[in-house]
């Protein structure tokens, strides 16, 4: 791609920002994904944590080779490129493999969220109700989402790994990887000259005469359309989840509003409200993960289908893709620690936001571990911070609004709202403590593992 024609190289002043942004954001993505892996590893008994850990590992693989791409591609127009055909095949293989792996695990995560909200939605209607003095038997409670996913988790893992490995491996086996200046990467694109070779076909989505071998064109189109289909699946599942959660929460709220104080069973109302909060929490996380995935991949997918002769539009999309495409690990890290940040802000309202984020990014899960991390952060000022926390405990923290994501963990049953907002020493308030607050996030399985 160039200033005038596609075949001419870009000026260094235009090409250098692409390399700098791609390498910088790839490095940050590796850092963010490693934070998620570090926090999730002690809790691999949870299907949700396993999916997040594998997804983050896939993002690390993808980001590492995106970081190395500008150096190891055979681009003779740059002084920093030392690549050859072998390094191009290596870069292309791991990039195609990593891109598909990340896409499929976002699909798996979205489907997991869907199973979770189905279980919690149905569980809100399984209690016994009275009708003309007769009790109706409870409906059969559906399986726990862990049971549903557990039965198919191995199949999902095999599918998510085998398909990317097969497509990426096929490209390497038939030597279909080469440097494509349109996307500035080694991809499934083997250029050829139709005047010299019979097995040479035009690329259907380009308006200029660009040709590739039949096998590389077929594999390349398969790869591109799988990415598009994967994105569509994630969006459809997200929309289905949002619609189903809105239906369930609207129905539950109307039922609660229609009951008079005499008719209302406080315990049942509390459980109903917990289910509403959990449904909204799972829905929110699903939307955020899907938007993160789309915000990263849509620019690259669009880049593939932009006509190759539209030079300046192509460069604009290359610049945006160089920033956002490698940034998926950063976005997912923010989404993953977001519930922990919200919980810690309730527990320690006097702490600055920077301190809260640093604690949330640590492995600390129980109160003692959290205090150890805070002591390291505050240093000599820790005693003053601790005294301030003890003074504010029962004041700001007691009255803080509990965020909707407070109960977030798809596999854990909601805790009692009263146990979250009450204060020690008042009625049932002895149930309130920092450990119960952080448990839905720091220790989703309740086994005491560090979060």
Image (spheres, rainbow, N blue to C red):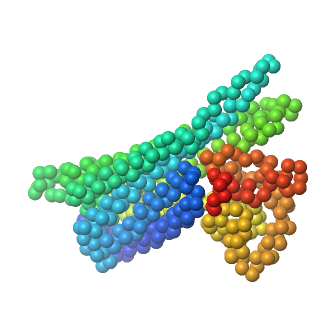
| Quarter location, residue 43 | bottom right
Tally the numbered discs.
Answer: 0
Q: Give how far across and how far down residue 335 sits, in percent.
A: 58, 57
| Quarter location, residue 74 | bottom left
Query: Can see residue 283?
Result: yes
Q: Residue at left 51%, top 52%? A: 51
Would residue 220 appear left or right of 384 to someone viewing this image?
A: left
Frontmost residue, 152 versus 232: 152
Query: Can see residue 302?
Result: no
193 is higher (above) or lower (below) than 410: below
Quadrant of the drawing holding the C terminus:
bottom right
Frontmost residue, 254 versus 444: 444
Q: Give how far across and how far down residue 70 sits, in percent.
A: 35, 71
Q: Give how far across and how far down residue 350 sits, in percent.
A: 77, 68
Q: Residue at left 55%, top 64%? A: 38
Q: Residue at left 30%, top 75%? A: 81
Q: Residue at left 25%, top 62%? A: 178
Q: Give how far across and how far down residue 30 sits, in percent.
A: 48, 67
Quadrant of the drawing holding the N terminus:
bottom left
443 is higher (above) or lower (below) than 67: above
Q: Residue furthest bottom?
A: 380
Frontmost residue, 144 versus 313: 144
Q: Residue furthest top?
A: 132
Would residue 322 appear left or right of 91 to someone viewing this image?
A: right
247 is higher (above) or lower (below) than 400: above
Q: Residue furthest front?
A: 447
Would residue 54 appear left or right of 79 to someone viewing this image?
A: right
433 is higher (above) or lower (below) than 287: below
């Amino acid at each position: 791609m160039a200033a005038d024609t596609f075949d001419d190289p870009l000026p260094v002043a235009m090409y250098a920002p692409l390399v700098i942004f791609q390498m910088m954001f790839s490095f940050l993505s590796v850092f963010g994904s490693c934070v998620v892996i570090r926090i999730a590893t002690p809790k691999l008994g949870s299907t949700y944590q396993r999916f997040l850990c594998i997804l983050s590992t896939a993002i690390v693989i993808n980001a590492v080779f995106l970081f190395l791409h500008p150096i190891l591609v055979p681009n003779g127009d740059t002084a920093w490129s030392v690549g050859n055909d072998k390094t191009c095949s290596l870069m292309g293989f791991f990039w195609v493999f990593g891109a598909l792996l990340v896409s499929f695990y976002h699909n798996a995560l979205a489907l997991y969220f869907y199973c979770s909200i189905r279980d919690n939605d149905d569980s809100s209607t399984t209690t016994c109700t009275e009708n003309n003095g007769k009790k109706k038997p409870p409906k059969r409670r559906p399986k726990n989402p862990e049971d549903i996913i557990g039965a198919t988790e191995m199949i999902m893992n095999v599918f998510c790994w085998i398909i990317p490995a097969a497509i990426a491996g096929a490209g390497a086996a038939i030597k279909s990887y080469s440097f494509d200046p349109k996307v500035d990467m080694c991809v499934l694109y083997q250029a050829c000259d139709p005047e010299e070779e019979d097995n040479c076909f035009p690329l259907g989505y380009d308006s200029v005469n660009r040709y590739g071998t039949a096998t590389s064109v077929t594999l390349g189109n398969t790869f591109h359309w799988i990415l598009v289909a994967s994105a569509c699946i994630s969006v459809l599942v997200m929309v289905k989840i949002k619609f189903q959660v809105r239906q369930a929460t609207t129905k539950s709220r109307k039922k609660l509003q229609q009951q008079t104080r005499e008719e209302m069973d406080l315990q049942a109302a509390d459980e109903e409200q917990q289910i509403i909060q959990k449904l909204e929490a799972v829905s929110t996380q699903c939307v955020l993960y899907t938007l993160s995935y789309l915000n990263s991949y849509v620019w690259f997918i669009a880049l593939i289908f932009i006509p190759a002769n539209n030079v300046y539009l192509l460069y604009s999309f290359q610049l945006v893709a160089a920033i956002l495409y490698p940034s998926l690990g950063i976005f997912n890290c923010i989404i993953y620690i977001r519930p922990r940040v919200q919980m810690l802000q309730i527990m320690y309202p006097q702490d600055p936001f920077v301190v809260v984020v640093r604690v949330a990014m640590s492995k600390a899960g129980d109160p003692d571990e959290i205090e150890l991390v805070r002591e390291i952060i505050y240093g000599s000022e820790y005693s003053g911070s601790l005294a301030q926390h003890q003074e504010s405990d029962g004041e700001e923290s007691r009255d803080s609004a509990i965020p909707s994501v407070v109960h977030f963990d798809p596999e854990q049953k909601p805790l009692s709202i009263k146990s979250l907002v009450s204060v020690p020493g008042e009625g049932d308030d002895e149930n309130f403590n920092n450990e119960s607050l952080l448990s839905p996030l720091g220790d989703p399985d309740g086994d005491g593992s560090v979060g």
